[in-house]
Amino acid sequence: MNRTAILASCAELPTGDGDDDALVPALESLGFSVSWAAWDADAAFEDADAVILRATWDYPSRRPEFLAWCESVPSLFNSAAVVRWNTDKSYLVELLDAGLAVVPTTLVSPGDDARFPSSDFVVKPSVGAGSRGAARFAAGEDASAHVATLHAEGHTALIQPYQSSVDTSGELALVYIGGFYSHAFTKSAMLGSEVDSSGLYLSEKLAPASPPADAVALAEDMLDAASALLGILRAELLYARVDVVRGADGKPLLLELELTEPSLGFRQADESAALRFASAVRQQLA
């Protein structure tokens, strides 16, 4: 059976950043006709068997329009309901409230006053991608001006204590496909990095990784908790990336749970990872 799959991108990166290149032959080998299209382009998204969010990285400034488009696509992965929940980082507070090990997170809505941690901290918009709008501040520093800038742009500000382990170990990204662990990679610290030529994200250095058991256990807990909050099965998530850092006590903490359009590190994974992804797409359509 021949099926059609559209990999959704944006006008600035119409075929992604290269990380997903292996997906096209993998999907084709399993009977899909594959094309790329910017999410706001005139493409037949409603007729595709699968529309897979991959590089829709211009959505933060157009989130209402993007969410409306997601709702209009019959076969979107991940689903529009997942996208709505996951594209506002207030989900971190929900996971914290559920008792999960998450980097402490405070939300400051426009009109509210901010209180800053006594240690180094980060301020960023609750809706954003690629670390755009994120800034690091020293202990005792007044970040009110940055919060005011975010508020003026219509954003809720998100404040987190800076995790110093990022400076030495970076972040660990664990990738799940169809609810099952696939592979992992490390990401170097992004704050202070240069913006990519597309203007959509900060450049970062990636490397393959073998995740320790405690990080895997944390990732499993996060996926189970997120699925419960969303009222879905883990298997309904075509892809997920769990970004983990180490806290001051050395224990793993969730930094972000990426369920919308994350880079999945196929260039840092084994050759069969793209085929696992393609097989999971077939499973979603079964």
Image (cartoon, grey):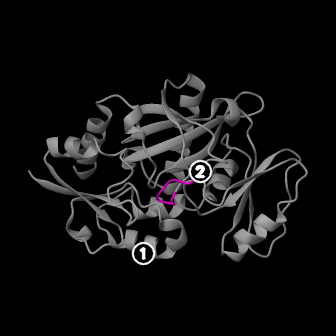
The secondary structure making up most of the magenta span is loop
Question: Is 197 part of what is drawn in magenta?
Answer: yes
**Magenta segment: does it hold 189?**
no
Cα distance between the residues tagged 2 and 1: 31 Å
Q: Secondary structure at mark 2?
A: loop
Q: Residue at x 50, y 65 (%)?
A: 84
Please tell me whether mark 2 or mark 1 is closer to you in this view: 2
- The segment highlighted magenta reads 195-200
Vertical order, 41 against 134 (above or below): below
The residue sitting at 35% across, 67% down in the picture is 39
Residue 35, by quadrant, is: bottom left
Mark 2 crowdedness (10 Å alpha carbons): few <14, some 14-19, many ≥20? few
70 is higher (above) or lower (below) than 220: below
Q: Which residue is mark 2?
A: 194
Instruction: Give the x, y percent position of residue 98.
Output: 66, 48
The residue type indicated by label 1 comes to: Ala
Q: Dividing the picture into quarters, in which one does residue 131 lie?
A: bottom right
Looking at numbered disc 2 in the image, what kind of residue is underneath it? Glu
Q: In the image, 225: left or right of 58?
A: right
Q: Position of residue 145 (x, y in %)?
A: 81, 67
Q: Secondary structure at mark 1?
A: helix
65 vs 227, nearest the viewer: 65
Q: Which mark is residue 180?
A: none
Q: Which residue lies under the disc numbered 1?
A: 68
Relative side of 15 to 151, left or right:
left
In the image, residue 132 sits, relative to residue 173, either above or below, namely: below
Residue found at x 28% / y 41%: 22
N-terminal label among 2 and 1: 1
Towards the viewer: 181 or 268: 268
Residue 168 on image: x %, y %: 68, 30
Circles 2 and 1, Cβ within 8 Å, touching? The answer is: no
